[in-house]
Image (tube, rainbow, N blue to C red):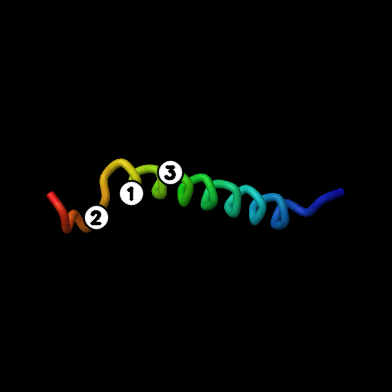
Amino acid sequence: MPTSIGWDCGGLKLSLQRHNEGQQQYDRVFPKDISSP
């Protein structure tokens, strides 16, 4: 029987990974530093 703590940690890690992937896509569409016009 898996512990709820382990499941929560896995879910948190997964959501954090999803957030990072979304942030990378956002950075690709809207670059932070637009040095060249």
Q: Residues within 10 Å of mark 1 (few under 14, many from 20)?
A: few
Alpha-carbon distance for marks 2 and 3?
15 Å
The residue under label 3 is 22
- 24 relative to 33 in the view: left or right: right
The residue under label 2 is 32
Q: Earlier in the sequence, mark 3 or mark 1?
A: 3
The residue under label 1 is 27
x and y percentages locating residue 33 in the rendered image:
21, 58
x and y percentages locating residue 25 in the rendered image:
40, 43
- 30 relative to 9 in the view: left or right: left
Q: Earlier in the sequence, mark 1 or mark 2?
A: 1
Q: In front of the other: label 3 or label 1?
A: 1
The residue positioned farthest toward the front in the image shown: 36
Kind of residue indicated by mark 1: Asp
Q: Using the image as rendered, state which of residue 26 and residue 35 is in the foreground.
A: 35
Q: Residues within 10 Å of mark 3 (few under 14, many from 20)?
A: few
Kind of residue indicated by mark 2: Lys
Query: Contact (CB < 8 A) between labels 1 and 2?
Result: yes
Alpha-carbon distance for marks 1 and 2?
7 Å
Q: Using the image as rendered, state which of residue 23 and residue 2 is in the foreground.
A: 23
- Tag 1 secondary structure: helix
Alpha-carbon distance for marks 3 and 1?
9 Å
Number of marks in picture:
3
x and y percentages locating residue 32 in the rendered image:
24, 55
Q: Earlier in the sequence, mark 2 or mark 3?
A: 3
Q: Residue at x 78, y 54 (%)?
A: 3
The residue positioned farthest toward the left in the image shown: 37
Q: Residue at x 54, y 51 (%)?
A: 17
